[in-house]
Image (tube, rainbow, N blue to C red):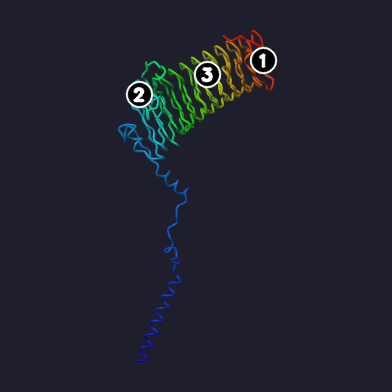
């Protein structure tokens, strides 16, 4: 019996040794006892981007708006070539892209019933309270005129081709026009969009409008043959950066700063406009105008008026129908500009003006004289 027990004990010990030897040949299973590692934010972003979808309309979706409604941040809504009568509402974080701005056309006739202060507007495209996203390769046309007459207290609102309210998206390589208002209207202190390489031509008002405290950037846009300005910047706190735009053959100014607006205009071409290349009017208006080319405008290359401040530095103002730079009852800083070949004077200002000067301006070849410090503006 004792021998039997000893043999059994010896047998169990051998089995245990075999088990121990087998266990020693295995990898430790400690990782099974650990929690699953938490993804880092960068890894989460990569995963989300890898899940981004392309939604097509027409095709997967019958309308462009239904595709936008189904899209999630990071998704692209691809609009095929065609002419579509829709009033689109953009969604934060998506990409809305046409096949080509020549062939993908959103055309909508907005009824002349809108009033200032409404929570939304029917336009070819409205972008409201969007922190990110992109619109590209679309033509956006608001085709209905608005015959209503603006009078004190009636608060009529004319509809633009694209309405941007308190948003900071990118609009790139699009066309925008309106038969009632502006091509692109950017409004609100929460707006800082990037407008790049767009064509904003032939609108009843301005090609691009920044207003109501809007910031943002307009770069390499073409704004031609609008019934008012190429680019209009209006109101206290409104201060965009305007760079390398072409503002040509507009019925008012190429670029117009008004009613306390600020901002910077640099290396723009403003030519052949019916009034001035660049205008800055009203108390508190104080733009930085740097290295712009203002030529062949019917009146002045640059015009400061009605109490405006601002700075004109190293601009070229040539071949304008009146003066290179004109200053009427305003107080700008003028430095290092080239003022040549204008039909009246290189630099003209009246007795109410109080300009200050930095680097000597290069003034030559102006038909009535180089500088007149006591002109009378009509």
Element carrying mark 2: strand
Rendered image: mark on residue 108: 2
Residue drawn 56% across the image and 21% down it = 283
State yes or no: discs 2 and 3 in contact (Cβ < 8 Å): no
Rendered image: mark on residue 254: 3
Q: Earlier in the sequence, mark 1 or mark 2?
A: 2
Q: Earlier in the sequence, mark 1 or mark 3?
A: 3
Q: Nearer the viewer, residue 101 or 373?
A: 373
Rendering coords of residue 242 (x, y %): 54, 26
Rendered image: mark on residue 64: none
Rendering coords of residue 327 (x, y %): 61, 16
Task: Tell which residue pokes out farthest to the front in this image.
Answer: 153
The quarter holding residue 118 reads top left
Q: CA distance from mark 2 to mark 3?
A: 27 Å
Element carrying mark 1: strand
Q: Which residue is mark 1?
A: 363
Q: CA distance from mark 1 to mark 2?
A: 50 Å
Badge 1, how many Cα within 10 Å: few under 14, some, many 20+?
many
Image quadrant where one finds the N terminus: bottom left
Q: How many marks?
A: 3
Q: Nearer the viewer, residue 170 or 28?
A: 170
Element carrying mark 3: loop
The quarter holding residue 276 reads top right
Image quadrant where one finds the C terminus: top right
In the rendered structure, the answer to whether residue 203 lies left or right of residue 67 reads right
- Indicate whether 223 appears above or below 3: above
Rendering coords of residue 194 (x, y %): 49, 31
Rendering coords of residue 105 (x, y %): 37, 25
């Amino acid at each position: 019996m004792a021998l039997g027990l000893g043999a059994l004990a010896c047998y169990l010990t051998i089995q245990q040794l075999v088990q121990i030897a087998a266990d020693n040949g295995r990898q430790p299973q400690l990782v099974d006892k650990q929690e699953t590692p938490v993804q880092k934010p960068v890894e989460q972003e990569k995963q989300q981007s890898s899940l981004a979808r392309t939604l097509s309309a027409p095709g997967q979706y019958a309308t462009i708006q239904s595709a936008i409604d189904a899209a999630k941040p990071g998704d692209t809504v691809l609009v095929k070539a065609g002419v579509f009568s829709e009033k689109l509402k953009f969604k934060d974080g998506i990409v809305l892209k046409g096949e080509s701005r020549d062939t993908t056309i959103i055309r909508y006739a907005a009824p002349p019933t809108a009033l200032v202060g409404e929570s939304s507007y029917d336009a070819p495209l409205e972008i409201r309270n969007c922190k990110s996203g992109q619109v590209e390769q679309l033509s956006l046309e608001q085709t209905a005129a608005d015959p209503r007459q603006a009078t004190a207290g009636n608060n009529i609102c004319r509809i633009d081709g694209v309405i941007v309210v308190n948003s900071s998206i990118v609009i790139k390589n699009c066309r925008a026009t309106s038969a009632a208002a502006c091509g692109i209207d950017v409004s609100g202190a929460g707006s800082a969009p990037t407008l790049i390489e767009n064509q904003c031509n032939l609108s009843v008002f301005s090609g691009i409008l920044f207003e109501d405290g809007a910031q943002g950037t307009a770069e390499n846009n073409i704004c031609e043959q609008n019934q008012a300005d190429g680019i209009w910047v209006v109101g206290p706190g409104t201060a965009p950066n305007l760079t390398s735009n072409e503002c040509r053959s507009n019925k008012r100014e190429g670029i117009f700063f008004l009613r306390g607006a600020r901002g910077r205009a640099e290396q723009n071409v403003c030519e052949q406009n019916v009034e001035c290349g660049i205008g800055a009017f009203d108390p508190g208006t104080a733009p930085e105008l740097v290295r712009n080319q203002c030529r062949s405008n019917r009146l002045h290359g640059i015009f400061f008026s009605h109490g405006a401040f601002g700075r004109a530095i190293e601009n070229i103002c040539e071949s304008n129908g009146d003066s290179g730079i004109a200053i009427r009852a305003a107080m700008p800083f003028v430095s290092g500009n080239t003022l040549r070949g204008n039909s009246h004077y290189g630099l003209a200002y009246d007795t109410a003006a109080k300009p200050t000067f930095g680097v000597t301006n290069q003034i030559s070849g102006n038909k009535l004289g180089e500088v007149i410090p006591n002109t009378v503006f009509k």
